[in-house]
Image: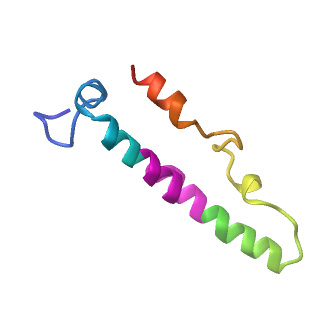
Amino acid sequence: MLNGVGGRTVQEAKQNLSPAEFASWVMYVNQYGSINPSRRIEFSLAQVSVQINHALGGHNTLADYMPHTKADDTISFEDAMESWT
């Protein structure tokens, strides 16, 4: 971190993030997906690839075009809260 530019460190976030704010972030991620830009790009490209595949008569799924995402790549709210303590 460069003199506070760019946000907080993980340790500072763990100390300063309230449970209510954490719950808000969990709801956001559950509704809109990961905030990781690489995953968002991978997901967008996978959507286009699946549409092209289906237009050409294929039967692939999003998972076939998302090698860095596991099907069970989610965490429950309780597990997330436990990992922050």
The magenta stretch spans which residues? 26-44
Q: Which residue is at 30% across, 27% downward?
A: 14
Q: How is the image coloured?
A: rainbow
Does residue 72 belong to the magenta stretch? no
* Above or below for 56 versus 79: below
* Above or below for 9 versus 27: above
| Residue 40 placement, left or right of 24 | right
| Residue 9 placement, left or right of 57 | left
Residue 11 image offset from top left, x and y in percent:
28, 23
Q: Which residue is at 89% across, 76% downward?
A: 57
| Corner quadrant of residue 76 | top right
Q: Which residue is at 82% across, 74% downward?
A: 54
| Residue 63 placement, left or right of 2 | right
Residue 17 image offset from top left, x and y in percent:
27, 34
Q: Nearer the viewer, residue 28 or 56?
A: 28
| Corner quadrant of residue 21 | top left
Q: Nearer the viewer, residue 71 or 39?
A: 71
* Above or below for 18 versus 53: above
Q: Nearer the viewer, residue 50 or 16?
A: 16
Characterize the magenta stretch by its predominant secondary structure.
Answer: helix
* Above or below for 50 versus 72: below
| Corner quadrant of residue 75 | top right
Q: Quadrant of the C terminus?
A: top left
